[in-house]
Image: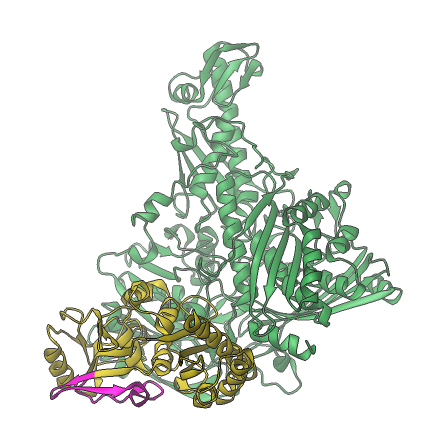
Chain colours: A green, B yellow
Amino acid sequence: MTDTTTTPPEIGGVGHSVKRVEDARLIEGQGNFLDDIALPGMLHMALVRSPVAHARINGIDTDAATAVDGVLAVVTGELMAAHGLAWMPTLSGDTQAVLATDKVRYQGQEVAAVIATDPYAAADGAELVDVDYEMLDAITTPQQSLAEGAALIRDEKEGQTDNLAYTWETGDEAATDAAFAGADRVVSLTTHYPRSHPSPLETCGIVADVNSVTGQATIYMTSQAPHAHRTLFALVAGLPEQNIRIISPDIGGGFGNKVPIYPGYVVATAASLLIGQPVKWVETRTGNLISTGFGRDYYMTGELALTNEGRIQAMRVDMLSDQGAFYSDAQPTRYRAGLFHVCTGSYDFPHAHIKCRGAFTNKAPGGVAYRCSFRITEASYLIERLMQTAADELGIDPAELRLRNFIQPEQFPYETATGFVYDSGDYPTALRKALDAAGYDELRAEQAAARAEGRLVGIGIAHFTEAVGAGPAHTYDIAGLKMIDSAELRVHPTGKAILKLGVKTQGQGHETTFAQIVAEETGIPATDIKVIHGDTDDTPYGLGTYASRSTPVGGAATAMVARKIADKARHIAAHLLEAAPEDIERDADKFHVAGSPDQAVSIQDAAFAAYTNLPEGMEYGLEDVTYYNPPNLTFPYGSYVVVVDVDPETGVWKVRRMVALDDCGVRINPMIVEGQIHGGLTEGFAMSSMQWITFDDDGNCIGSNFMDYLVPTAWETPRFELLETVTPSPHHPIGAKGVGESATVGSPAAFVNAVVDALAHLGVRNIDMPVLPDRVWEAIDSAGG
Amino acid sequence: MLPARFDYVAASSVEEAIAAKAEGGDEARILAGGQSLLPMMKLRFATPSKLVDINRIDGLDAIRSHNGHWHVGALVRHADIAASGAVSGAVASAAPWIADPLVRNLGTMCGSVAHCDPEGDWNSVLLATGAEVVAQGPSGRRTIAIGDFVQDFFTNSLAEDEMVVALHIPVPSGRSGGSYQKLERKVGDYATVGVAAHLELAADGTISAAGVAMTSVAPINRKATDAEALLVGNAPSVELFAEAGEAAAAAADPRDDVRGSARWKRRVVAAFTRRALTAAAEQAQA
């Protein structure tokens, strides 16, 4: 492992694998999750969800529910409409029903809410709400949805005459077409990235406490973006923003699932406002799986134009996304399919043209994300599967084909054909290192020998490039809010400090790593720094934690505010040492006069002086705030190699080895980075091998609980061998890039490529995820194997 | 977990449990490990009027060897069987494949058998080994062959006022062996395909008795009787076991679902039957 530390362990700055400070309280049951919150007089809410995918609502009878002992009220869409809240805007500029008034458009859609004195009574009441549904045909694929004569799902939407949710394209179509027309070879792949779900262990929930006298709304909420949510609450509900306080307590996993505002939040807040008592809503597991933001459901056709020698000349992509009933992706406003156009990946493409369409279907809305950095999982999967296809079609080794086409180290900063400017990288070194660790040449020899014996061995490669850290204000906003972020640092007289963040951890370890950044930049020991986040009354504004943006943006803000503090402390040190500020140098843990290391004061001395003994004209105190507008995204990358053994008789495949090299720039806490990578690789393995949310022809969700929607355990998860290279981001204050989503983005293609590679000699070119044993067996069987 | 309202009785004897269950009528349920019942109550798919908890009854938690049978009491957990050095053959082979470690710690073998979920593993093992279920009612105990006990999808042949108090599983003797082969998508998943096999060899090395039963490939756990008939009287061989595998595949009645196509499941039945028989024969010949 690369040692990047510049501070001693007792300071614990960047590069130290210190244990996570948040773990002790979480492991010992002293965390404070949403469902732990109990307020005096708190009521409980249960949602009534549609059992069918598409139906007109002819009436709702609430009498039996209201009669249940303990039930206080049943809220319907009609009541919400009376307050102008039956519909709400989505993060993509569409509208979404809060409680259905006219139709239900997917199974699991919110239809009514029961408010009761205890959760059992609320659940009993919800069972008795009688909704008169007039069944309509369900549309369950975007192909059906866009077919001639398909029923209009969004008939309430003014000007909407078909089921098209959006169209978007980028790149140079004419130049791309010309390159294809003149290409020696054209390779194409059509694949579906299935619908998956972030499935955090903690479901979504809220405790809304609106004071009927003061109008103060204190909202405890499972939120990855509390500040942005406060602003959206203000805009949607018309509440004055200073009266809204959003507190995001300990969060049991987010993965993108806790970015959107869900109907349950809005109804509970409205109920608290109307009743004048706190209202708690905690989503059921099934509610979470069938109604909240999912990931993917992209149908993609990609083509590569190549020379006979395997030089790539152009890429063409036609993508159709299944948005569900409402277009509610969380993504930068100007990009209608997130950052999917980063699909040229790690390769030097002269030309590319990307065409995207999205369709409404009778399925849950969202498409928000699932640890995907705004749709980069899909983009990375497509290009890395295409590279495998091209290698197989041209008869070139897949590692060699990548090496022939990589963006070279000297080409950085590199502008892609779709407009990204990659900051730094050395792809050939990374891939070669991963191949060497796997013993690639020996594996290829073994594979050939195995095939001769009728055994199937596959070696899969994926080399991904991520684009994270949204983002520069000139390009990136969500609902108009620029994607900057902030940090506020207060150093107390005894030299202990509080760091307040605009971002919000859901398990990423911010309380540890962000203190390490401050320790690095100021010399204050990380253990002396308390990190506060998640409470909008107590932290500076920020867009929140998702899309691997915390370290690139919030981490940069933290480094910059710490530098401001260190600089003021240096001036104070100069005063204490009776020297000129420009003669003061900072060590890891003290300030000294240049040339006289013994003439020194500590950061703690300087902090005390900030409140007791200041130079003439200096303002008292040692605190500051920084709002950071990143100059660019950061572009972490990695090279993954997977080896699988496939049982030809049953199609069962097992991962024999998984070598994962990640380059995320400077690692603040290497242990936490490795934990992130392990988690991401596990999720990548899950999606490639077992995980999908599917629907029957009537739009019933298959996968509404953890018996049907599979989350792997340690038992079936392969062992991972981690490697690294360190190529710092040139524009990030400490050279760090994001890493939270790298492994989820990069690994699915490596697993699928491995299985396809095992069958490549039979002519198999594609098996869609999840690569279930029956699909593998069918592929072998239909290839005549 | 927010189940519908129910009454709860903690019985201190089998007699008391039977009486309490009878009082509750057909909506009363016995609570042993609760690993199938409670998830269904959570989803309100099951809304029993009364739960009769038998966990405090003494003497139901032992595995005893008696008259050539293992007697498995109603409170013997899956984990007890997996940890028991006393069992062998198909029973020992299947035990670590039941659900996941958490479920195995609480779930009971008798409860799983009584549940008659066609995706449950134990009933295939009991069908292959020729086990019996011991039921107790107000008028005493009776023994029911497993094939008669398993009636249908989630349906057993217990009377309303009876409960399962034990299983009697033949102890493999002489030259015998057994195996359970299970394909699952992940730990804790129901079988996509499961096959239990039990073989006994005569002195001349030919097969004197054979049991083959399948999980998750028919509306109930199903014995592959044609495969069994093929085996008996013949010497174990690769060809014989492959032929038995084909017979089992023909007897299976799988369906297309999210776990895979019916066509593929039949091929897995054929492969797993052959593998289970091969493993059983290796034990028997050892």
In the figure, is residue A410 to the left or right of B26?
right
Magenta-drawn segment: B135-162
Residue A85 picture location, percent across and down = 42, 69
Which image quarter: residue A424? top right
**Outermost residue, front direction?**
B204
Residue B151 lies in the magenta stretch: yes
Name the side, left or right, on which B117 lies relative to A749: left
Taking the image as shown, residue A283 lies to the left or right of residue B20, namely: right
Does B207 appear above or below A407?
A: below
Q: Is residue A643 magenta?
A: no
The residue closer to the viewer here, A194 or B22, is: B22
Residue A108 locus on image (x, y percent): 43, 75
Q: Nearer the viewer, residue A785 or A460?
A: A785
Residue lying furthest right: A182
Q: Quadrant of the N terminus of chain A?
A: top right
Residue A617 visible in the shown view: no
Determine whether, in the image, residue A205 is placed left or right of residue A450.
left
Residue at 27% across, 83% down = B132
* Most foreground residue, A588 or A17: A17
User: For residue A92, what is the image quadrant?
Assistant: bottom right
Visible residue check, residue A759: yes
